[in-house]
Image (cartoon, rainbow, N blue to C red):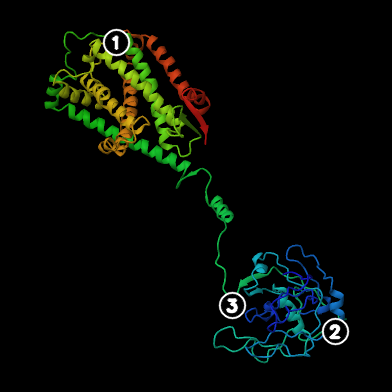
Amino acid sequence: MATYVRSMRQGLPRVPGGEAWPPAADSPVAGTAPSEDAEAPGNALVVPAHAVATASSLTRETATGGKEVESDVAGPAEAGAGNRSTRSGLPRVPGGKPWPPAGAVGAPIAASVPVAETHGVPSNLEARPDTAREVVGTGASVAVPAGQAQAALAAATSDRPVRRGLPRAKGAGPLPAAGTAPAVMAIGSGETAPGPRNETEPAEAAPAPIPTVIDAPPQQGRPTEPATLTAQARSALAIVSTEPGRFGAYTRKQQLGFAVIGAFALLGAATVVVAAAQWFRHLPFMLDFLIAYPGEYHLPENATPGFPAWVQWQHFFNVFLMVLIIRTGLQVRSEKRPGAFWTPKWSKKGKGKISLALWFHQSLDVLWLINGVVFFVLLFATGHWIRIVPTSWEVFPNALSALLQYISLNWPAENGWVNYNSLQQLMYFLTVFLAAPLAAITGVRMSELWPKDTKTLNKAYPIEWARAVHFPVMLYFTVFIVVHVALVFATGALRNLNHMYAGTDVVNWAGFWIFFVSLLIIVGGWIAARPLVLAPIAKLSGKVTGR
């Protein structure tokens, strides 16, 4: 609802070959809006019968601040409104004459058009002139476009009957109904009278209550815009509807509750399994089985006890590399937008460009393969292979016996300095001779070292097979490390740590402190595995670039 003080916009000529209409010199009267708003049949002005004031004493209030806006042409409008003839417009029906007829005298129009206060009224009340809105309430004012307000004021001060417009529905009669009389009104005054008042009489002012806006049905024939949300509105709704600390469908407290419930469920299941294993091993036939197969068998006479120094060093390097390989493997698997890339020096046209995390993962794989080759050579060269390679079929029933004793929490006899129990021997054999080669073969197939142009080789060994095997093998190594460390501490930590880290079969703290230092080194490597540290090392063999 604005006061138009600028020149009127010119449109198409009224006759073929004529000039644009209206002429450039004509100016709109302050307080009026485009004529189509006043002529539109659907924009019927809803005015309370008790709203009255003198049109010349009206003041215009803005919807936000309630300040008075006066037009620069107020004086001329007031002075000449009564003597100026009404300008004819387009015909109301096809082939008809211009409307209103020539010579018709227009009603005086106030320079300042008042509008209702819109405290509490949505801002789109003024932004949607195509939809009629009625303000309901005791002494409520009417919020209408300026064009409709001007037309209502003109009709209120005229002796002519209300001009009837087009029907609002197809087949219906013209609106308003015949015989409708205009109501003299003052928008926002909150005061009415049954007829015209003397301008000298003071008008009793009444406070206007907060209006209630009711959306009237849209006019027939006028399209309405669909209600759409902007990106800013959608983001605001998302912020409001998203609870802080929520991950997915659950909050942190809910996830913590699920974790606690899951832990208790696992503890309960483990208790049931342990109780069942203890009951089962005390059955008569199982007692005989445990006596016949205590959990280990005797090694050949040429087997040497203890652990050589090379085994201790190989064990440390293997643990260090495996922890970092698992870390970088998970990082590569979950990384969506790498922050840095590495391109080899021998690359042609940028081929072989990979993420810095993948470069570090493959570099660790190469070191792990070198360490593994050294381990295999020394394992068979020194005869230490007898400790981890089964040499009798008794390994299977003894492994079953050891498993039952572990589950029932009645640990089998531990003598790792001389001989592993059969379950340990089978697990070491599977890890060294099956899981490690699978990890290496599938890793090479997925790496940049694999020839990409050999169609026959790629068809014989698809990369999908390698990916389907590589990740489960990584999970196996993770579970193996966790269970292995747990059993080392549960079955005699000081003695077991001395076997592998100190090379002695005594119970003291030497092996523990060596293990503690090695653990600090592993943690330091984990923390240092970041682009700030890796980039200078990667530049020695290639080019490091950012995203």
Q: Mark 1 sits on what residue?
A: 307
Q: Mark 3 sits on what residue?
A: 219
Please tell me which of labels 2 and 3 falls first in the chain: 2
Query: Along the line of sight, which residue is nearer the eye, 244 or 535?
Result: 535
The amino acid type found where label 2 is placed reads: Asn
Is 165 drawn above or below residue 390 in the view shown? below
x%, y% of residue 132? 63, 75
For the residues labelled 2 and 3, say whether their Cβ atoms are less than 8 Å apart: no
Q: Mark 2 sits on what residue?
A: 198
The amino acid type found where label 1 is placed reads: Phe
**Is disc 3 placed on a helix, strand or loop?**
loop
x%, y% of residue 207? 76, 70
Please tell me which of labels 2 and 1 falls first in the chain: 2
Q: Is residue 50 visible?
A: no
For the residues labelled 2 and 1, say whether their Cβ atoms are less than 8 Å apart: no
Is 83 drawn above or below residue 471 in the view shown? below
Query: Along the line of sight, which residue is nearer the eye, 273 or 314?
Result: 314
Q: Identify the residue at horizontal 65%, vertical 72% (top origin).
A: 129
Q: Identify the residue at horizontal 69%, vertical 72% (top origin).
A: 143
Is 135 drawn above or below residue 545 in the view shown? below
The amino acid type found where label 3 is placed reads: Gln
